[in-house]
Image (cartoon, rainbow, N blue to C red):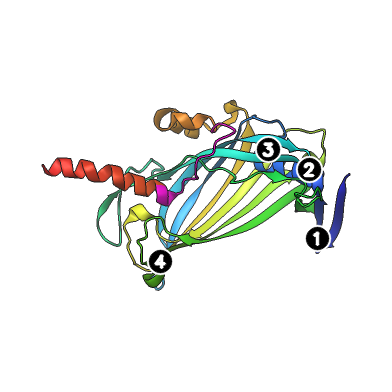
Amino acid sequence: MLAFTVVVTLQAQTMEFEGEKALEIRQKTTCSTLIEGKTSYGMWEGKIYSRVQGEKDRHLFNVVGINVRQCDCVEDDVRGKGFRSVSREIMMYLDPKTNEILDTWENPWTGETVDVVHVANDPVNMRRYVYENDEDGIPTVKTSFRKYADVAVTSYEIPLFYKNPLAGDYQKYVGGTYHAMEIFNTYYKAEELTNSNIKDLSQSNISWQRMSQWLPWMEMGSRPGWIIANATGESVLGKENIWPRIQKILDERYPEYNTPPNKKDKRPNETSWTVFKKFLADKEPKAKEGEE
């Protein structure tokens, strides 16, 4: 049964759904399609700035990235239909003047030249399935969006605060948590989002912002300051719609990122911190070999 409400707030209508319709909309906004196993490509481009108290903000990098994902669909006798997305993603740090990929970077605060560790997170999966009902068969999944004329807008703020994977055993005494916030605003055609007969979204445009601590490879230690990312992009269906610049990066540097992980992928998720930890572990033996 379709259940939804309409709440008028200022110039927008807030459309609220629950149960099967809510699950359907949630899957569309997550994977751009209701078709299981169909690959979608979310791409973005933007800039990263520094923010240090008492000094002018610096334009540190340009960025370009892609998330490659698919949805796995399941059905339970009690919980009803459900889905989970599996994905992997890259984001490249570019020279702010030339837009060329940076593999080393001269830190303007320390004067040191450091290796750039680009985002290459595999996997980035939903940790659990979202179902339309709870364990008792009662519809529980809900979703909502703001509707402006024929445009649907979803908005999410995601505060991040967790133990830094690079931290030691005593970090709860001296600090060592990762603190950030991500903000997503995504725009769709409202009719495509709510019409069950439309399986694929033809439009999904995103605005993404991130405020976080220094990137680990910048080697900033305990220096005060933040980085602010601002980017826009789109999700598309069909490999032919991948931006040429990104397709070139995939083919030359990350060919395995042309396709999403297996639908039943159960690996733990990667972050910039866990990837950097592996980078350090791989770099240390090579450094020791060079000293011999």
- The N terminus, quarter of image: top right
Q: Which segment did they paint magenta?
A: 261-274
The answer to whether the residues at label 1 and label 2 have Cβ atoms under 8 Å apart is: no
**Upstream in sequence: badge 1 or badge 2:** 1
Q: Amino acid at mark 4?
A: Gly
Describe the element under mark 1 as helix, strand or loop: loop
Is 182 inside the magenta-drawn segment?
no
**Upstream in sequence: badge 1 or badge 3:** 1
Residue 160 drawn at (x, y percent): 53, 60
The answer to whether the residues at label 3 and label 2 have Cβ atoms under 8 Å apart is: no
Residue toward you, 150 or 265: 265
Which residue is under mark 4?
225
Residue 7 in view here: yes
Residue 95 in view here: no
Residue toward you, 67 or 97: 67
Which residue is under mark 3?
32
Picture layout, residue 130 above or below residue 57:
above
